[in-house]
Image (cartoon, helix red, strand yellow):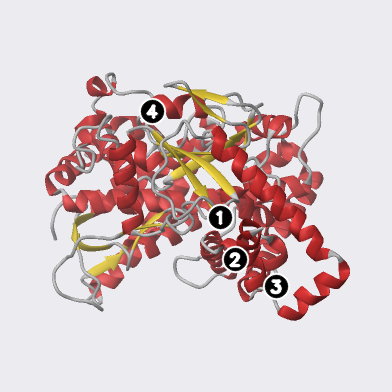
C-alpha cells in the first residue's frame, strides 16, 4: 500500500480536493487504484526484464531517473559521462511510466535502426505530443499504413524535384544575405544566426511545399509565428510529466495556447490543399505550372489507384514544414559557427566555392555544382557529427530485440538511440569533441562503422528528406562563404569578447542566447571590400 500511495501522490497532489471527493463518490478513485496497481506491476516486470543492462544511479526504484534528463548544456555533458562510463548502452526509467534502453554505440544502434518497419513503431514519449499537429503522417504512422505512405511520398523527393528546388534555395538565401548587408551597413557588428536562418528555411519550405510567397524574412507571418509557437510548446510539454496526459494538458494555459496556434496552422494548410485540388480538377495533370510538394502528393496514386485523402495530405504537408525548417536551420547555423571558429577550414571552403564560380555570369549555385564541393561537404558532415540537429531518435518494437553481448530489449520498451552519444563516443571517434572535417575524407570514411554517423537516422525509417536538407545546406553554406567572412561574434546586449557557447538541446540543437557571428561582407563576392 505505501508504494501505491506514492504512485498516486503526484495525481492527488495536483488535483483539486473537491474533484478527489467526487471521484470517491463516483467510483473513479477505485479505477485509479486499479490503474496504479497495473502501473506498478508493469514497472516491476520491465525492471526485471531490463536487469541485464547497466543502470545509472536512480532516485529510487519507483521514481527511477525522473528529472535527470535535462534540456541544457549540462544535460549533454551528462550524456558524455554516460557514454564514457557505459560504452554502449544503459537502461533508464522515467518513474514507473516510461522504460528506456539508451544506446550510444554503432554496433548496438544498427540492429535497432535496421529492423524491419513491420515490427518498428514510434513511441508516445517523444512523438505522441506531435500527433495533434501532424496527425497520422509518415513520421508518426506504423505498419502497413507507414509503408503505403512512404511509397506515395517518395516521388516528392525524387532527384528531378530536388533539382527544381535549388533555385528556391538560392532565392531565399539571397533575400537573407541582402537583409544581412542592410543590418551591417546600419552599424550592427554581430548577427544571431538562428533567427535569420530559421526564417530563411521557412521561406524556402513555404515556396517548395505550397508555392506560397510569405515574405516572412522581411515581415511577420501568422502561419510562421504559429509554427514557432507550436514547437516551443511541445518542448515545454515534454518536460512536464503531468502534461503528458491529454486530459490534464488541454485544461492548462499551455494547452489552450497550443490549440489556438494549431488552429492557425491547420486552417492555412487545409485551405491550400483544397484550393490546389480544385485547381488540378479544372486544369488536369498536364498544367505547365511548376509542381510543388502538395501538387505531387495530390496526384500520386498507389498500386491500387488510390491517392491520399485531403486529411492525409494536410498531415504530410504539416510534417514537411515541421521536420524540414528547424532541423535544417540548426544544421546551417552550427556549420557557419564551426567555420567561424576554424578560419583555415573556412578559407579552404571559400576558395573551393570561388574556383567553382570563376568566370560565371550568374552567381547562383546549380544542381550540378553540389557534387563539386567536396571539402565544403566534408565540413558540413563534420558539423552534423559534432552538432547533430536531432540528438536522439526513439523506437518501440512489437517483439523482443536482441543486441550484442546477449542483451535483449523487451517488447514495448522504448529504445532511445542517442545520435549525439554515438557521434561523440570516444570508443568510435578519436578526439570526438574536436572539429576535424578530414574524418570524412573518402579514404578515412572506409574505416568508420556505417552507423557511427547517423544525423538523419538510418534504416527503413530514416529521414525521407535528407537529400533535400543536404542540398539546401550546401547551397546556403557555399553562397554565405562566397559573400561573407565569418568570425565569432557577441550578443550586443551582453558585450565583451566572444564566450564559449552553451548548447541547448530542444526539439533541435540550439544555443543559449543564440549563435552570434561577426560578418564581413566580401565585395565583389569572394574578396574583401
The residue drawn where x is 39% and y is 58% is 197
* Residue situated in front as seen by the camera: 52 or 258: 52
Q: Earlier in the sequence, mark 4 or mark 2?
A: 4
Q: Residues within 10 Å of mark 2 (few under 14, many from 20)?
A: many
- Left or right: 145 as drawn, with respect to 512: right
Question: Helix or strand or loop: what does disc 1 sit on?
Answer: helix
Query: Picture coordinates of residue 471 (x, y %)?
Result: 41, 39
Nearer to us: label 3 or label 1: 3
35 lies left or right of 111: right
Task: Name which of mark 2 and mark 3 comes first in the sequence.
Answer: 2
- Left or right? Give the position of 242 relative to 286: left
Kindly report the distance in space between the C-alpha atoms of the residues bearing marks 4 and 2: 39 Å
Mark pair 4, 1: CA separation? 36 Å
Q: Residue at x 66, y 66 (%)?
A: 11
The residue where tag 2 is placed is 223
Which residue corresponds to the image point at 35% horizontal and 67% vertical from the top-left?
179
Q: Secondary structure at mark 4?
A: helix
Mark 1 burial class by Cα count in 10 Å: few <14, some 14-19, many 20+? many
Which residue bears the numbered disc 1?
Answer: 206
When the figure is inspected, residue 483 is found, relative to residue 440, above or below; the finding is below
Q: Are marks 1 and 2 in contact (CB under 8 Å)?
A: yes
Cα gap from disc 2 to disc 3, whole angstroms: 24 Å
Q: Earlier in the sequence, mark 1 or mark 2?
A: 1
Residue hosting label 4: 106
Assess whether mark 2 and mark 4 are in contact (beta carbons under 8 angstroms).
no
Determine if residue 315 is in view.
yes
Return the residue found at the far front: 1
- Image quarter for residue 529? bottom left
Nearer the camera: disc 4 or disc 2: 4
Which label number is shown at residue 251? 3
Alpha carbon distance from label 4 to label 3: 42 Å
Amino acid at each position: 500500500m505505501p508504494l501505491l500511495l506514492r504512485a498516486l501522490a503526484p495525481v492527488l497532489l495536483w488535483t483539486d480536493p473537491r474533484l478527489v471527493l467526487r471521484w470517491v463518490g463516483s467510483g473513479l478513485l477505485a479505477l485509479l487504484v486499479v490503474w496504479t496497481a497495473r502501473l506498478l506491476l508493469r514497472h516491476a516486470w520491465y525492471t526485471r526484464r531490463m536487469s541485464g543492462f547497466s543502470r545509472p544511479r536512480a532516485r529510487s526504484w519507483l521514481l527511477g531517473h525522473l528529472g535527470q534528463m535535462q534540456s541544457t548544456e549540462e544535460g549533454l555533458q551528462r550524456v558524455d559521462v554516460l557514454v564514457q562510463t557505459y560504452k554502449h548502452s544503459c537502461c533508464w526509467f522515467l518513474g514507473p511510466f516510461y522504460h528506456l534502453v539508451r544506446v550510444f554505440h554503432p554496433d548496438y544502434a544498427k540492429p535497432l535502426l535496421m529492423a524491419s518497419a513491420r515490427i518498428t513503431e514510434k513511441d508516445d514519449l517523444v512523438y505522441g505530443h506531435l500527433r495533434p499537429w501532424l496527425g497520422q503522417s509518415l513520421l508518426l504512422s506504423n505498419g502497413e499504413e507507414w509503408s503505403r505512405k512512404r511509397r506515395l511520398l517518395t516521388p516528392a523527393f525524387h532527384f528531378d524535384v530536388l533539382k527544381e528546388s535549388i533555385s528556391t534555395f538560392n532565392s531565399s538565401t539571397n533575400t537573407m544575405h541582402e537583409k544581412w548587408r542592410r543590418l551591417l551597413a546600419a552599424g550592427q557588428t554581430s548577427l544571431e544566426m538562428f533567427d535569420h536562418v530559421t526564417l530563411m528555411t521557412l521561406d524556402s519550405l513555404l515556396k517548395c511545399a505550397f508555392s506560397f510567397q510569405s515574405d516572412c524574412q522581411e515581415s511577420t507571418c501568422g502561419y510562421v509565428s504559429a509554427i514557432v509557437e507550436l514547437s516551443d510548446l511541445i518542448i515545454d510539454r515534454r518536460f512536464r510529466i503531468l502534461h503528458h496526459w491529454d486530459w490534464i494538458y488541454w485544461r492548462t494555459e499551455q494547452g489552450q495556447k497550443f490549440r489556438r496556434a494549431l488552429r492557425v496552422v491547420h486552417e492555412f494548410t487545409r485551405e491550400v490543399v483544397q484550393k490546389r485540388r480544385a485547381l488540378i480538377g479544372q486544369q488536369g495533370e498536364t498544367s505547365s505550372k511548376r509542381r510543388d510538394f502538395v501538387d505531387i502528393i495530390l496526384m500520386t496514386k498507389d498500386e491500387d489507384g488510390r491517392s491520399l485523402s485531403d486529411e492525409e495530405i494536410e498531415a504530410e504537408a504539416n510534417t514537411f514544414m515541421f521536420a524540414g525548417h528547424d532541423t535544417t536551420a540548426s544544421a546551417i547555423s552550427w556549420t557557419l559557427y564551426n567555420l567561424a571558429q576554424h578560419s583555415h577550414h573556412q578559407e579552404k571552403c571559400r576558395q573551393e566555392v570561388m574556383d567553382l564560380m570563376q568566370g560565371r555570369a550568374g552567381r547562383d549555385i546549380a544542381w550540378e555544382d553540389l557534387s563539386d564541393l567536396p571539402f565544403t561537404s566534408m565540413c558540413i558532415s563534420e558539423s552534423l557529427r559534432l552538432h547533430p540537429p536531432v540528438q536522439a531518435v526513439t523506437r518501440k518494437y512489437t517483439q523482443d530485440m536482441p543486441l550484442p553481448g546477449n542483451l535483449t530489449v523487451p517488447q514495448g520498451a522504448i529504445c532511445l538511440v542517442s545520435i549525439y552519444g554515438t557521434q561523440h563516443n570516444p570508443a568510435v571517434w578519436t578526439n570526438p569533441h574536436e572539429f576535424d572535417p578530414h574524418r570524412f575524407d573518402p579514404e578515412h570514411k572506409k574505416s568508420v562503422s556505417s552507423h557511427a554517423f547517423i544525423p538523419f537516422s538510418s534504416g527503413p525509417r530514416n529521414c525521407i528528406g535528407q537529400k533535400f536538407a543536404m542540398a539546401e545546406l550546401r547551397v546556403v553554406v557555399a553562397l554565405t562563404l562566397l559573400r561573407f567572412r565569418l568570425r565569432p561574434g557577441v550578443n550586443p546586449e551582453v558585450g565583451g569578447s566572444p564566450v564559449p557557447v552553451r548548447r541547448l538541446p530542444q526539439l533541435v540543437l540550439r544555443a543559449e542566447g543564440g549563435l552570434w557571428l561577426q560578418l564581413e561582407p566580401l565585395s565583389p563576392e569572394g574578396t574583401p571590400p
